Image: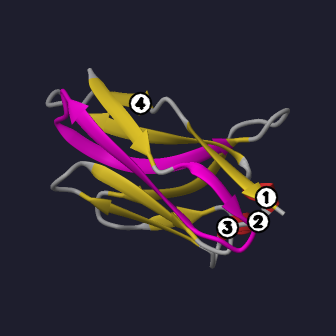
Amino acid sequence: QAQLVESGGGLVQAGGSLRLSCAASGSIFRIITMGWYRQAPGKQRELVASITASGNTNYADSVKGRFTISRDNAKNTVYLQMNSLKPEDTAVYYCKVDQEDKWGLRYTYWGQGTQVTVSS
C-alpha cells in the first residue's frame, strides 16, 4: 500500500498563486503517472494536470498557461504550481498516483484532498 500526503491548499484572492504538493510513501515500486484532479461542489471530479515518469504533461484546457505540474522522482513527489487563480478554480484538489509493482500489476492511489478557495 502507498500513502499520499497533500499540502499547500488554502484561501487566495483572484490573480494570486498557490503551490500544491503531494508526496507518496509506503510500498512504492515504480510510479507511472502522477496527477491532480479537482472537484467543485455539485460537479464531477475532473483532471487538472498529469505527468508521466518521463515528464510528459497533460493539462485541462481551463488551466493551460496558468498551472504547471512537475515531479521529483527521487522524492516521489508531484507539485502543482497554480498562477493567475480564478474563482472558478475553487475546488477540492486531489492527488492521484498510478504505480506498477514488480509483477506488473497496476494500482491507483488517491490523496485525501486539499481545499483551494479563490475569492473574487
Residue 59, position in %: x, y?
59, 64
Looking at the rendering, the stretch of residues picked out in magenta corresponds to: 9-38
| Mark 1 secondary-structure assignment | strand
Say which amino acid is labelled 4: Thr
Mark identifier at residue 119? 1
Residue at the spot x=73%, y=57% of the render? 118
Q: Could you tell me residue 7's position as x and y percent?
A: 43, 45
Upstream in the sequence, badge 1 or badge 4? 4
Numbered badge on residue 107: none
Q: Quadrant of residue 5?
A: top left
Q: Give the Cα distance between marks 1 and 4.
A: 32 Å
Badge 1 density bin: few <14, some 14–19, many ≥20, Cα 10 Å:
some
Q: Where does label 2 land, which residue?
A: 86
Say whether disc 2 or disc 4 marks the residue closer to the N-terminus.
2
What quarter of the picture does the N terminus occupy? top left
Which residue bears the numbered disc 4? 108
86 is within the stretch colored magenta = no
- The answer to whether residue 38 is above or below residue 56 is above
- Residue nearest the viewer, comparing 54 with 46: 46
Which of 23 and 18 lies nearest the eye of the viewer? 18
